Image (cartoon, coloured by chain):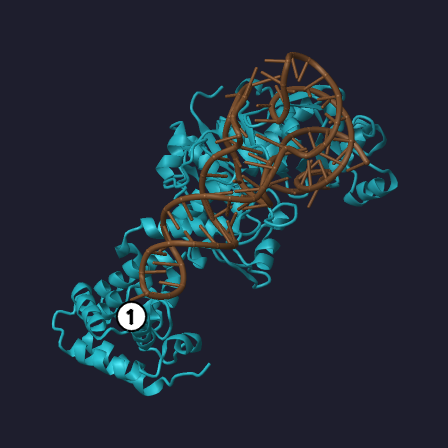
Chain colours: A cyan, B brown
Amino acid sequence: MNSKVRVRFAPSPTGPLHIGGVRTALYNYLFAKKHGGEMLLRIEDTDSARFVPRAEEYIVESLNWLGIDIDEGVGAKTEGAHAPYRQSERKFIYRKYVDQLLEAGLAYIAFDTPAELEAKRTEIANFQYDAKTRGRMTNSLTLPVDEVKKRIESDQQYVVRIKIEPNLEIKVQDLIRGEVIVNSSVIDDKVLFKSSDNLPTYHLANVVDDYLMEISHVIRGEEWLPSAPLHVLLYQYLGWTDVMPQFAHLPLLLKPDGNGKLSKRDGDRLGFPVFPLNWKDPKTGETSSGYREAGYFPEAVVNFLALLGWNPGTDQEIFSMEDLIEQFSLERVSKSGAKFDYEKGKWFNHKYLQIKNNDEIAAIFQQNLKEKNIDVDVEKVKMVVSLVKERVNFVKEIWDQSAFFFESPTQYETKAVQKRWKPETPTQLKELIDVLHTIDDFTPENTEKKVLDWISINNYHIGNVMNAFRISIVGEAKGPHMFDIVALIGKDETISRLKKAIENIKPIEL
RNA sequence: GGUCCAUUCGUCUAUCGGUUAGGACGCCAGGUUUUCAUCCUGGAAAGAGGAGUUCGAUUCUCCUAUGGACUACCA
């Protein structure tokens, strides 16, 4: 057993990193940091046919954005003692272990072509390449030694298969699920190595690399649980049982509606991102939206994801990365899949928007304003942010709640006018203009006092006056406290908007 | 089809044999507010079904049902 905790996140660079993969990376990271261990990133690109350019950079950038630091391997500051960390660059390493298994008689060479295997599968229901069938296939167990040699020398392609002893009980100790027992007869003689590209398959590469990289815990998705017994067997066959890592298989992230694993299509269909970052497919040119570009804070995404499948057993819901590291444990990871609840994701972002200080939010919002060619003082932006941020889930929504701070309304909401614009309103608002003219100290408190005094002295209907005032300034019956708004836009602008409204709004008969 | 895994409010979940089955999101209602929102208070809402074990099962065991994953010379 390794005393030091070393975990790995080992994605395949076949496209953008799925949000479920992000959670796997997060749990690995939390577990490593909790135990003072190391987190490595290894790229599992043993399938030369499925390689997608830029996918690796995407993975690294995603983890960086989320604050999941890589200690070793691809994307780490210094790669580390076990380089290289891309399996395609490690191809020279695996052959040795393949030969070791071959020599020990624990694996064999098979020449069956994909077409032949396909034929077998259609011919025989539930066909499995195993102890029962391998004697009737084309392989080094059925062919004479010199025939095998001849075929290899004439460059005939082959694969190396593990030779699984039937009827053994294979026990997998899972940190989340307990003991899982599988009979070896149900596992087929999986391909470990293919001569076509001289690369091992996932199963072998993964076991060899975890061994060489001294991985102490393998934390991965539940989709790997069925092949875990095979991996245990490989550790045995290779003589590494005493240093075999501990396994933990995480529950899956499911579709919000219906059943099944969360997929890219669900995001398109239901209108939410399933990737951390935007991604443009290099082949199709198709783009998929990401959480970052959708306006999420990385802290919110981390918090949301952490709680999808894990909880501390308390009522705490808001966790910083430090909180998570301190409290995380595999024992408290749930066993069943979690449906992806996008509404709750939005709520987390809302929470973080309230927690964050206004300077940070104002900086982002000011960028949004610049894109609209609105250039205003950062102090004003901060004020606006503080007045409206509690109303929104995302920074980009602030504009919808605050446009009237920056531009005079061009139209007035019919329903509000209908309800609040009375025949006497224009006269009253003209009086209001006079009142405002007399105010020098245009602070919210002072203006409020003066205006409310005027309303009360004249015994006006406060609701009608104030709402007409609001319609004139905002254009609708919405927004923060009136006197905060006018203080911010200033006396001149306030009066000018009132004049404009008096000119343009006509009472609407019901 | 086979193997494995799972099953508490609509959703995420708490409960580690004895609880009025708790919290959160969402939803509904009321209150606060000059408006809208926020906020506050309240409400509706759950142990898949059946056998056991036990004085007592959501909790332990088994069966059934349902869902999921896997079943490639993918990872």
- Of residues A454 and A54, the one nearer the viewer is A454
- Of residues A483 and B70, the one nearer the viewer is A483
What is the quadrant of residue A208 in the picture?
A: top right
Name the residue at 55% across, 17% down. Answer: A242
- Of residues A74 and A327, the one nearer the viewer is A327
Please name the amino acid that badge 1 sits on. Answer: Ile
Horizontal side of residue A227 vs A79, given as left or right: right
The spot of residue A149 in percent (x, y) is 75, 32
Q: Label 1: chain?
A: A
Q: Is residue A240 visible?
A: yes
Q: Which residue is mark 1?
A: A462
Horizontal side of residue A224 vs A404, given as left or right: right
The spot of residue A24 in percent (x, y) is 51, 39
The spot of residue A209 in percent (x, y) is 54, 32
B53 relative to A335, above or below: above
**Given the current orientation, which residue lies at the most extreme bottom position?**
A503
A37 relative to A297, above or below: above
Q: Is residue A140 visible?
A: no
- Other-residue count near label 1 (Cα within 10 Å), few / some / many at <14 / 14–19 / ≥20: few
A414 relative to A321, above or below: below
Horizontal side of residue A299 vs B60, given as left or right: left
The spot of residue A106 in percent (x, y) is 70, 23
What is the quadrant of residue A384 in the picture?
A: bottom left
What is the quadrant of residue A107 in the picture?
A: top right
Count of marks overlaid on the render = 1
Name the residue at 31% across, 87% down. Answer: A503
